[in-house]
Amino acid sequence: MIADHTMPSVELPGGDLDVAKMPGHWLLARLGKRVLRPGGLGLTRALLHGLVIGAEDDVVEFAPGLGVTARLILERGPRRYVGVERDAQAAAWTSRQLPAKGNVSVVVGTADQTTLPAGFASVVIGEAMLSMQTQEQKRRIAAEAFRLLRPGGRYGIHELAVTPDDMPFGQRQAIDRALSGAIHVGARPLSGEGWRGLLESVGFQIEAVEFAPMHLLRPRRLVQDEGLVGALRLARNLLLDRAARRRVLAMRRVFEQHRANLAAIRVIARKV
């Protein structure tokens, strides 16, 4: 079971921003939502199961955020865990959510340039972060994951995907604009084939691909991810904060408007 590590909003990275300008994921975190992945805890657990993390693994996680996945990783007892956050405030906040152990750390760095040595890891994982990058930045991050891994190492991603693979370019652009406008972060999800092609382009061999519904803000998913108490707490906070409620409802409208063309995806790839 995941402990509730919801913090006062001002202590969250981005918590001092105006609600109207705050990135959607930090707004939801401020309201008490802990699981911020498009496929929810179910797809995160499936990703970790497929990566088969064990006592001999050195794990690097890009952008661990609230630390939910990090705690699930640590339950599997890896030899070492390192989270990589891009700014010092986020790194310090995430570090406080994790056990104070010598083999657990969060460092400041970017996912495309971690400064960790080549061959440092046997597992690299990243969730809900590539979708917000340009195509070139996606490639750089995937290439950094490849560099960090030892031969035989595994890379797992959990991201937003557009469907079908042959969606017209103009329709995809319209979805990107709608998502970016709602969440106030650039959104550039790929199709299933696009995600596969990205990882293959830097040298990975694809081992598994799985899709799940993108139901981030639907009531049933909220209860599944947050528990009944957490979902009720989120609902209460929304009722008490009119500006935040307006933003969240706008995000949900966009998700529902494009529900036929949005999905969550997990991909597991190996460095051979």
Image: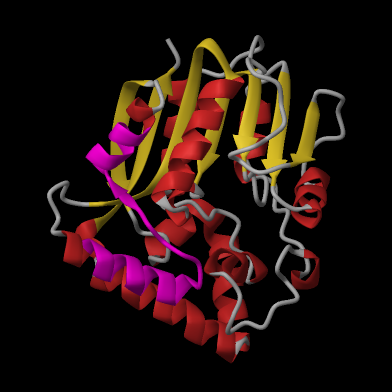
Residue 3 located left or right of residue 136? right
Q: Residue 132, position in %: x, y?
A: 47, 56
Which residue appears at 67% of the width and 51% of the height?
A: 66
Residue 42 seen in render = no
The answer to whether residue 92 is left or right of residue 128 is right
> Which residue lies most toward the bottom here?
242
**Residue 50 in view, yes or no:** yes
Percent position (x, y) of residue 161? 31, 50
Q: How is the image coloured?
A: secondary structure
In the rendered view, tell whether residue 91 sits above or below residue 206. Answer: below
Q: Position of residue 61 (x, y in %)?
A: 62, 35
Q: Which residues are magenta?
A: 172-198
**Looking at the figure, which quarter contains the N terminus?**
top right
Closest to the observer, 81 or 111: 111
Q: Is residue 152 above or below residue 251?
A: above
Which quadrant of the figure has residue 158? Answer: top left
Rendering coords of residue 119 (x, y %): 63, 15
Residue 186 in magenta?
A: yes
Q: In the displayed structure, would residue 179 be above or below residue 111?
A: below
